[in-house]
Image (spheres, grey):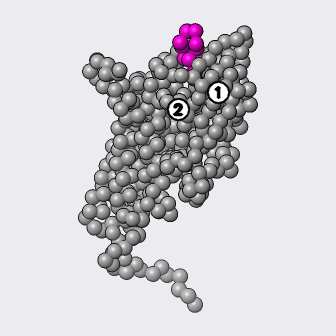
């Protein structure tokens, strides 16, 4: 008969600690209900996204099969009130963004573009009829949205240099121009497009359907980052949009900026999650990779890299925890969001670099995950306002002097 008594572990057997990037237990700040939501998101990301991330990233394709599963989580519109949105706090939304990016920054970006930038534009700038018309279906992921602001030759300068134009002809608006790097746009049902009115020079927002006359989109190929995100080049050629589809409370770039302020925090959370995921992968590798007869995690230089990574992750988590509290209290300003986006993306970039260094040559293989994190960190570093532009926003706040040209 085989004995059921557990075998005592050999005296010198190495039993690695559980990998956990939440070193300061910031998740404990959430209540039981919120932690349960975060746990569901983590289970979804680990169970549904992680097994396919490398495959779809390599193929430059989007896994549409996960969209209904994401919808079933009931996390669309966390932070919004009404219109079928999940409600809850902005801090909770941040944890959701972190958990998604911890596994894959592309899927986190899909979530952020759809529920944040696109639905957020309607939530902040639409009238009641428009919110009731579009948001419930978006909260159920039945209608997917994109957000068209950046242009082929205009990125950081869109506030004053937007070239896409709109003009009114009776009860129809005619849009002309191009938008580039627009996530989700190759398959989105609703595209929020920002255009400058020819007569007043004011920026206005429109919800443009994929079948609107004069609307076309071409997928951007050969990207080195966020390859699962389907970015498009949108071309508007005398594109006709009814007045009923113009966002009624978007009448200047200040209104556009309200959306960016709200969603910039999400991108900072993505940076935290990306760094967190890279650290956890690197730690697992250090626990299992052996050299000279023992795990490399037992070597001083490897431990130095791990602690540098963990310090960056923990510092950015703590910053974002406080920013989420300010956002929920209605105290967050542009400069608060900008500092977080600038700082967290720099630290993310540094962290994934340390992770790649720890893995040596194996760090460039998709099979070891880290290469994907390194590449995706480059996109997070740039979109939703570059470090330089966010630095100038913070610099203006602390000095009282504008350095914008």
Residue 189 position (above or below residue 368): above
- The label on residue 325 is none
Instruction: Work out whether mark 2 precedes mark 1 in sequence or the reverse, and give the earlier one.
Output: 2
Q: Residue at x 34, y 55 (%)?
A: 354
Looking at the picture, how far across and down is residue 48, in whole percent?
61, 54
- Looking at the rendered image, the quarter that the N terminus falls into is bottom right
Per the model, the C-alpha gap separating discs 2 and 1 is: 13 Å
Question: Which residue bears the numbered disc 2?
Answer: 152
- Decide: few, some or many residues near mark 1? Use Cα within 10 Å; few <14, some 14-19, many ≥20: many
Looking at the picture, how far across and down is residue 154, in whole percent?
48, 28
| Residue 86 seen in the figure | no
| Residue 163 seen in the figure | yes
In magenta stretch: residue 192: no
Q: Residue at x 62, y 33 (%)?
A: 234
| SS under mark 1 | strand
- Decide: few, some or many residues near mark 2? Use Cα within 10 Å; few <14, some 14-19, many ≥20: few
Residue 376 position (above or below residue 171): below
- The label on residue 236 is 1
Q: Are marks 2 and 1 in contact (CB under 8 Å)?
A: no
Q: Residue at x 38, y 46 (%)?
A: 348
Nearest the eye: 17 or 99 = 99
Nearest the eye: 299 or 366 = 366
In the figure, is residue 177 to the left or right of 365? right
Stretch in magenta? 195-203
In magenta stretch: residue 197: yes
């Amino acid at each position: 008969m085989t004995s059921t008594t557990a075998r005592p572990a050999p005296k010198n057997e190495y039993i690695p600690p559980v990998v956990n990037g939440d070193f300061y237990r910031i998740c404990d700040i959430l209540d039981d209900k919120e932690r349960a939501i975060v746990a569901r998101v983590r289970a979804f990301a680990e169970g549904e996204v992680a097994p396919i991330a490398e495959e779809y990233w390599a193929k430059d394709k989007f896994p549409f099969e996960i969209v209904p599963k994401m919808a079933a989580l009931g996390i669309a519109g966390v932070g919004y009130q009404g219109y079928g949105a999940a409600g809850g706090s902005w801090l909770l939304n941040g944890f959701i963004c972190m958990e998604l990016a911890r596994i894959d920054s592309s899927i986190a970006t899909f979530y952020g573009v759809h529920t944040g930038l696109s639905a957020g534009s309607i939530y902040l700038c639409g009238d009641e009829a428009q919110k009731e018309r579009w948001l419930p279906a978006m909260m159920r992921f039945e209608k997917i949205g994109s957000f068209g602001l950046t242009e082929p030759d205009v990125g950081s300068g869109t506030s004053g240099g937007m070239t896409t134009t709109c003009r009114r002809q009776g009860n129809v608006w005619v849009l002309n121009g191009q938008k580039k790097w627009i996530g989700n746009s190759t398959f989105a049902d609703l595209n929020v497009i920002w255009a400058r009115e020819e007569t007043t020079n004011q920026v206005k927002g429109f919800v443009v359907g994929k079948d609107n006359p004069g609307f076309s989109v071409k997928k951007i190929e050969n990207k080195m980052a966020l390859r699962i995100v389907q970015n498009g080049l949108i071309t508007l050629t005398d594109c006709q949009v009814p007045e009923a589809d113009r966002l009624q409370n978007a009448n200047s770039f200040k209104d556009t900026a309200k959306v960016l302020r709200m969603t910039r925090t999400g991108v900072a959370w993505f940076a935290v999650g990306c760094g967190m995921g890279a650290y956890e992968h690197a730690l697992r590798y250090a626990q299992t990779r052996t050299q000279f007869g023992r795990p490399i995690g037992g070597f001083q230089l490897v431990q130095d890299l791990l602690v540098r990574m963990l310090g960056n992750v923990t510092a950015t988590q703590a910053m974002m925890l406080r920013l989420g509290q300010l956002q929920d209290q209605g105290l967050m300003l542009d400069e608060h969001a900008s500092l977080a986006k600038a700082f967290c993306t720099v630290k993310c970039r540094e962290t994934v670099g340390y992770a790649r260094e720890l893995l040596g040559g194996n760090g460039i293989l998709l099979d070891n995950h880290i290469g994907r994190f390194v590449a995706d960190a480059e996109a997070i570093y740039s979109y939703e306002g570059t470090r330089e532009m966010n630095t100038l926003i913070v610099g203006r706040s602390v000095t009282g002097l504008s350095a914008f040209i």
